[in-house]
Image (cartoon, helix red, strand yellow):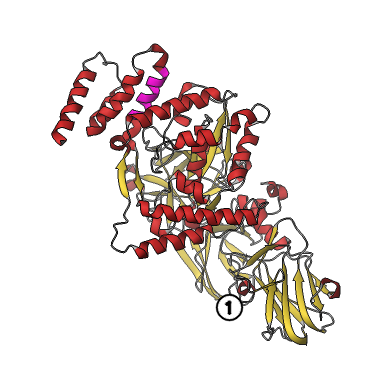
Amino acid sequence: MINNRIIIVLILSLIFFSCGQNNMPEDVEKALLLAGENQSELLKVINTYNKAPKDSLKLRSAYYLIANMPYHSFKKGHEIFDEAFVLAGKERERQIKENPREKNPKDSTYTKLGELLDSISKANPLLDKAPVLRYDLKFINAQYLIDNIELAFTAHKKMPLKLCENFNEFLHYVLPYRVGQEPIEANKRKDLYEEYSWVYDSLKTNSLDKVVAKIYDINRFRVISKRHPNYNYSYSFSQINHIKIADCTDITNYIVYILRALGIPAGVDYTTKLGNTNRSGGAHTWVFYLNNGNQRALNSGPVYFDLEKTFRFSSTPKVYRQQFHKKQEPPLEVTHLYRDVFDVTIPAIWNIEKLKNSSNVFLGIYDDNKSLFKIATAEKLKNDSAFFKNMGNNIIYFPYVESPDKPINYPFELTKNGKVIFFSNDETLLGKAKLLRKYPPFRIKSKKQKYRRIEDLNGAIIQGANIDADEYYINLDTISKFKTTQSIKFYFDNPKKYKFFRFKTEKYARKVSLATFKLLDDEKGRISKDWSKVLINNEEGSVDSKNIIDDNQLSFIERKHLTITYSFKKPKKIFGFEIQARNDGNHIDVGDNYELHYWDKKWISLGIKKADDTILVYNAIPKNMLYLLKNNSKGKEEFVFKFDDNGNQFWVGCSEYENDRSFYGL
């Protein structure tokens, strides 16, 4: 049987290659040779379009897809797991019904999916659950490719707007049958084309941006940081459609596929590292779509969110574009589409001989644990200097040859206007260095969210009553001018006995977060522990209620119209309360041991200090250097910073925007 198949493939190949197809692109011929037994399927596609002149663009499309198929493959999990996504999807539907107006409901879908995947694994211990690796070139049949080409042309023609500037944009951003490494599914493009067919009529009276925003609103995708360990490979689009929750890569790929199925040119842009964070490596992907020469970049969910301003101001060193066609090394760079970029020349003052004998000269960004993340390779070396092209500004870079322990110069800041400023040792001293944190207080995209976690506590009232009803509560205190992530104790002017004590926020349309709310038993600030129950928004037994009474400042509760009520069995005198906003735990904690370092060819310690205040002070330290503060007692997050002339910490790409409220519009 196998021999018969081989003979058939050889006969078809001979017939095809002998019929005057000498102008077939070379890369298509190579792909056909690599296809093995599947070559006959690919030849059927070519033969479908190589006969009539009217099909010349479709033939080019077939050539484009086939020529680039060798670069693509996918892993498909065992079908036994598919049921988990269906059932978890029902959990998602239930949560959406309970929160119909929430753009980003905090649902239990991911937890439910994990429980189901674990259950299936335990119930089938002998089953080989490893995913099957399939290569597109040897897996995809003729009908699948033909259907894809026909649907792409149909959708693009039906689109009432002219979105592609040229045929190459159609090839690259409408035609491909896949976006990333998602499993191939028959008829998925057709299903989405039909499901979202309302788009074409809607575009007659609405802008493309509004129509895409409606697609987001319909789906309300939720982005999580990682896949479940029992299914740690790309979700299929059907699986995502069930649960509407996945990591940014899977969600981005699905949104792009929906847009392409409708004839909207779209793709995936990504960064391998953000310039002022070490969180999860900082890699991120997002959606872009084209509109006749204009580009719109969007987050992956849950709502339509234009990223233009975010990337214009954020510290992103490089942005790349994911391509269906040939894998590029280096990949296609599009940083200039998002932010100001500058070419920089770095003279070598160390390891000059290694520089002369190596092409491996890099710029790195601080990652974690004193390591570097490689971000760029020198374009050329000349006169003992390294030249780097299109570098994102407002970022601190480390230049080195071969490995981070072989620096060629001091780290430097590439300023907003493209100036290179080295953190070099000029033998001067900074008299007093004041430290408040070991990690930047926010990133541009999260500034509004992080600051509101603090600001939303202002205006909250603390009340007391002997009957738990609104009309009986008396205001005891009002929180105002609250500006810190630290835990703060407040004392009542005139403590009185009450059976109920209540924290009540103003009625914002958004959710309010809180890490700690505890009552004080006496003037010394001892925490009251003899209450009978705690109610969150008048509900007893909330799973997360323990988060406000534990000693973990990273745990929190989050509610709209948040109220927290402490109930005692009998009236009790309470002297005040302790409160802490939701926070990242990277401020200075009293009692923890900290160690300040500066960089001079390597990280050098300036000594360990135990914090006795929320401000840590170091005296007479080397000036104009690059610094790093580590908490030796706990925590992993840390990042590099500098000091201003007054000894205050300055986080490049962050501190200059600290008082700029325009980012609240992001």
Q: Nearer the viewer, residue 4 or 448?
A: 4
Find residue 283 and report its horizontal and vertical position in percent.
Answer: 48, 50
What SS does tag 1 mark? loop
Q: Position of residue 184 (x, y in %)?
A: 38, 40
Amino acid type, residue under disc 1 in the picture: Gly
The answer to whether one can see residue 654 in this image is no
The answer to which of 420 and 42 lies nearer the viewer is 42
Residue name at image x 67 percent, y 31 percent: 206
Pinpoint residue 569: horizontal percent, then vertical percent: 73, 86
Q: Is residue 281 above or below residue 433?
A: above
Tell me the residue that label 1 is attached to.
591
Rate crowding at label 1 as few (under 14), some (14 to 19) or many (20 or more) other CA atoms within 10 Å.
few
Q: Residue at x 46, y 63 (%)?
A: 115
Q: Is residue 522 above or below residue 386?
A: below
615 left or right of 357 in image: right
Q: Is residue 606 above or below residue 666?
A: below
Indicate left or right for 149 with 481 as reference.
Answer: left
Q: Which residues are magenta?
A: 57-66
